[in-house]
Amino acid sequence: MLAGASDVSTQVGRSFSGLRERLRDATSAAHRELDAQLSAIDLTVFSGYRRFLQASAAALLPLEAALVDAGVARMFPDWPERSRSAAIAADLGRLGSAMPWAVRVSPLTQSGVLGTMYVLEGSRLGAKFLLKTVADSADPRVGEATAYLSHGTGKRLWQSFLSKLADDGSCDEDEAIEAARLAFAAFEQAADRA
């Protein structure tokens, strides 16, 4: 749903496909674990969907705040179009749910921004499948709170992220990989508490 550890030896300036593959390989176990955690939540019932959104917000909100603090808009001028904080807050409001507690995240470097964005932008791919599950809900409240899952639909945000990843020759791959791992860990911690 969102995007293992292997001994990854890296250097600055490797190719985009290589970095993308290393990010995928380095986070694959965390991705599977998070998918398993979130798959246990029934998104077709009100309480389950609310729990999913609360867990997602508990990680997404501080991660996006850390991205803003690190200057994500300088790297991604379309950041306002990418940010999903307002969308998830709107969904929680529609469900009558207060904003959740937040996972604590560390400040990000420029390379850390890319690793974190890898996880957040990749999660849009999984959101498409989750949206299909939510559509099966008999509870109309669930179907009315899909701004987060449908955010960015029809836009090429993943593809443009991959282009940025390919163009950034100054990326410290170790930092990017560590940030991606920490982003997955934030979502795992939030899912544990949900």
Image: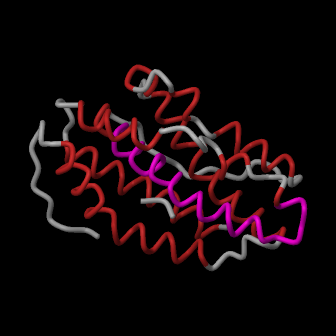
Q: Reply above or below: 97 against 137.
A: above
Mark count: 0
> In the displayed structure, does residue 169 sit left or right of residue 114?
left
Q: Quadrant of the C terminus?
A: bottom right
Q: How is the image coloured?
A: secondary structure
Q: Residue at x 59, y 41 (%)?
A: 152
Q: Residue at x 64, y 43 (%)?
A: 151
Which contiguous range is marked in magenta?
113-142
Locate residue 154, reporting x and y percent.
58, 41
**What secondary structure prevails in the magenta region?**
helix
Is 126 magenta? The answer is: yes
> In the displayed structure, does residue 26 sit left or right of residue 194?
left
Locate residue 131, reporting x and y percent.
67, 61
Q: Residue at x 57, y 47 (%)?
A: 60
Q: Residue at x 42, y 24 (%)?
A: 71
The residue positioned farthest toward the front in the image shown: 154
Locate residue 137, reporting x and y percent.
81, 70
